[in-house]
Amino acid sequence: MDERGGKMASQQQEVIDFCYGDGTPPVPVSRSERQFPFTDISVNTYRTIYTYPSAAPRTASVLLTYRPLGARNLLASTDQVLFYLETTIYPEAVNTTPAFALPDNVLQLPLNRPAVLPLATRDAEGDSVVYSLTRPRLSECGFASTSLPGYTYPNAVEQKGTLRIDPRRGVLSWNSPTSVGYYLLEVKAEEWRKGRKISETYLDLTVATRDLPGQPAAVLPPYEPVQEAPDNKFELTGEDLIVTVYPVPVQGTLNVLLRSAKPVKTQLHLLNGQGELLGEFYPSNSVQERWEINTRPLPAGVYLLRLQTPEKTYVQKFTKP
């Protein structure tokens, strides 16, 4: 967390509201440990114990302020300072969700040299774990999370070099950081047992690149965009807004979430594959809007979502099996 808020920031970090994801209100949880890798950034640990009333999939999460500021790959806005973490569990069997290994130097990476971070540890039950790079998330208690607006993968800031993670070994490689500063990285760990996914955990990591003396620069490989893992969402992205639609393909309710860095006037249209208008949605002139569209009466087929702003029109196709 960012410590530049002084005493007020420290006091607000002592207790956080933890969402267990079962419909109950968030619960205050006290901090149990605190470390300072840098004078202006702290690493905080919180511990809680909870018994769920039934064995249904749950997404436990926290939504915090004081995300470390000034990351070169995150546009600055009020919404984007929020700090969200989540873990989804499928409690059908005894299980320990995958942990991440954080080397001592994980927050400092050398400039112009390949950075290698082994993040995986052995799974307690011997389950298969698949790692992927993804975008930081944002949500509120009880709602599905979406990608954080304004995020760019670190190597895409200057479009130099490569950023990859080994899906099985969990080794993250950045070849190579070329500018000094803070960067945000997000890693997803999916845990599988007998062909079924039993957990999904996100690691949200702030790293700092430093110009360390006495190290020759490495040969920089050509720029390569990050290969993101497939998801059951699609996004319509503009310069100042992002609209996330899920799940796709859709069977029942189609969720549409709009987030914008500034107030924006939009219109959302639902059309069939022939371009015929099926529904119109007009949000308020705000930075956040949510719609739930009932698709159950619609026949199977191809559909279109059309988002119109004063500057541009975005169209995305999706299917209902």
Image (cartoon, rainbow, N blue to C red):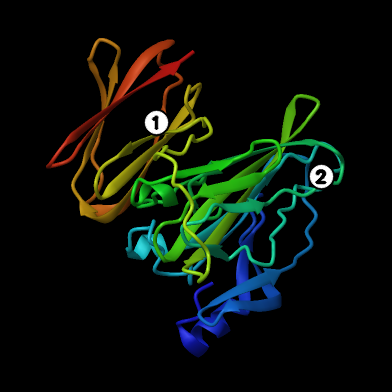
Q: Which numbered disc, 1 or 2, marks the residue that appears first in the sequence?
A: 2
Relative to 67, say whether 252 is above or below.
above
**Res 81 visible:** yes
Q: Nearer the viewer, residue 146 or 114?
A: 114
Q: Which residue is mark 1?
A: 293
Element at badge 1?
A: strand
Looking at the rendered image, the quarter that the N terminus falls into is bottom right
Label 1 is placed on what type of residue? Answer: Ile
Q: Position of residue 14 (x, y in %)?
A: 62, 79
> Which mark lies nearer to you, 1 or 2?
2
Relative to 9, say whether 21 is above or below.
above
Find residue 38 and report its image quarter: bottom right
Residue drawn at (44%, 41%) of the image: 221
Residue drawn at (28%, 47%) of the image: 241
**Res 23 visible:** no
Residue 245 lies left or right of residue 306; in this view the side is right
Of all residues, the one furthest to the left in this rendering is 310
Element at badge 2?
A: loop
Q: Position of residue 65 (x, y in %)?
A: 48, 69
Residue 271 lies left or right of residue 56; in this view the side is left
Residue drawn at (39%, 51%) of the image: 151
Residue drawn at (67%, 55%) of the image: 20
Q: Which residue is mark 2?
A: 123
Query: Counting other residues with Cα less than 10 Å from the Cα at mark 1, is it few (<14), some (14-19), or many (20 or more)?
Result: some
Q: Position of residue 266 (x, y in %)?
A: 21, 42
Q: Position of residue 70 (x, y in %)?
A: 39, 68
Find residue 127 and report its image quarter: top right
Find residue 171 and report its image quarter: top right
Q: Nearer the viewer, residue 175 or 317?
A: 175
